[in-house]
Image (cartoon, rainbow, N blue to C red):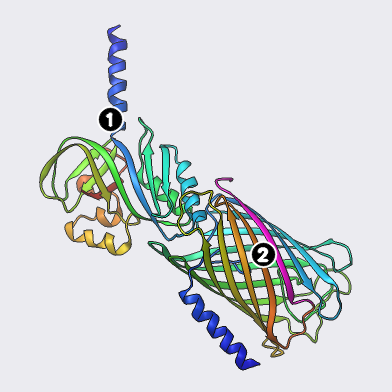
Amino acid sequence: MRYRYIVLLTGIMCWSIVARGQELFVYSEPASNMPAHSLGLRLSGWLMGERETDRLNTHVIPELMWGVNKRLMVHAEGFISNRDRSLRAEGTALYGKYRFYSHDGLYRHFRMAAFARFSANNADIHQEEIETNGHNSGYELGLIGTQLLHRTALSLTTSYERATDNFGKGNEFPSRQAGKAVNFSLSAGHLFWPKDYRHYGQVNVNAMVEVIGQYHPESGHAFTDLAPSVQLIFNSQTRVDIGYKFELAGNMQRTAPNGLLLRVEHLLFNAL
Amino acid sequence: MKKILFVAIFLCAASAAFSQIRSATLKASGLTCSMCSKAIYKSLQKVPFIQAVQPDIEGSTYTISFRPGSRVELDEVRKAVENAGFSVAALQVKAVFPKTAIANDAHVSLSGTNLHFLHVSPQTIQGEQTFTVVDKSFLPEREHRKYGQYTKMACFQTGRMAVCCSKEQGSGRIYHITL
């Protein structure tokens, strides 16, 4: 099983090197930033099937994104889920990304960015997996490196994530659980359409594939997910993403690792 | 009446002088997708002295026309591209010159913009000319450094006129250009 997984991962990496792609990844952020003074509105809906029951976990994450300047962008995130049977607000987070390196060439670039997220969540802690983007209070600090080469885009993200007590009585972080995680993701994109750009009104169709993993040094538990997705861009300003994430391998206790992501995002240029 | 005529002639002459930098072709680097291209397009449109922008998405190129009578600040064009998240790969500017003698290291002031010619043979130019800006951040770094061999003046590194030339009019900013 592990051998098949290694072969699959190697295949994806080789394919991604020759593929033609875009860097607006679905499950991770690229090292590039939004345009300065722009505003982004994003709404993500996660529909994840619980492993132990037949319930569908729904997480809705609205985000307001601001391009502060050419190097810095910040997001304000809200977390809503149906853990308590009906949809309710569970928390919020602040995310910031700072692009500290950029080397541009014709139809290519290499960028590096540092990011941080600080989250507050009042849901019960029901799994080993640490996710400050919707499940855990805590913080995440990471680095992103993105290479664009014509229509090929490859990105590597690595981060350190720390879970703390969630807010509310009974929502303390379990003392016997590992509270620290190391994350990685490797992303690649493919631009299917249009073959030639003629105007901004043309619909762009991208396909992405991302490998996402988490490791807990304290327990030795880990998982690796695969997340293929399709992205449509309308009027070079509005984005619709449809992705499906599933666990490839792992020994970590997770409530609902497999499921669908639907996202819509709109960018307002020169808004602030 | 004579006074009105004099003022009218003066204003026409002044606006003509500020119309000397007419248009430009900008090539941007660091992007492929149309969303990125549109970010640059929108950013350029917000520059006050730019009248119109015509994008070529596939070629990553923008044809820019400047508002007649406006003072053109080439750094603002570059900043618009950088604020969108990308870089200038090339900026070719069309301008109308009065009869002007030029040579390597010649300094010329055009519509309040200081220009320092590099890698040009001694000649006299007049009328519409196209020049390429070879300053840092207007070209890829390797291309920009090649022009350093044509001058010993410090302004090539700093972008600002040195003491030798600071008596000339303008803000002190000087753009290094070639034909």
Q: Nearer the viewer, residue B123 or B76?
A: B123
* Residue that mark 2 sits on: A242
Is residue B34 in view? yes
* Residue that mark 1 sits on: B17
The CA span between labels 2 and 1 is: 55 Å
Label 2: element kind = strand
Is residue A103 in view? no
Left or right: B50 as drawn, with respect to A90 = left
- Which amino acid, mark 2? Ile
Mark 1 Cα shell of 10 Å, populated few (<14), some (14-19), many (≥20)? many
Query: Does residue A19 sit above or below A39 in this rendering?
Result: below
Image-quadrant location for residue A142: bottom right
Chain of the residue displaying label 2: A
Left or right: A160 as drawn, with respect to B37 = right
- Are the residues tagged 2 and 1 within 8 Å (C-beta)? no
Q: Position of residue B103 (x, y in %)?
A: 13, 47
> Which residues lie in the magenta part?
A256-272
Q: Position of residue B111 (x, y in %)?
A: 28, 35
Query: Does residue A250 sit above or below A78 in this rendering?
Result: below
Q: Is residue A257 magenta?
A: yes
Q: Main secondary structure of the magenta part?
A: strand
- Which amino acid, mark 1? Ala
Image-quadrant location for residue B97: top left
Indicate the quadrant containing the N terminus of chain B: top left, top right, bottom left or bottom right: top left
Label 1: element kind = helix
Q: Is residue B50 magenta?
A: no
Chain of the residue displaying label 1: B
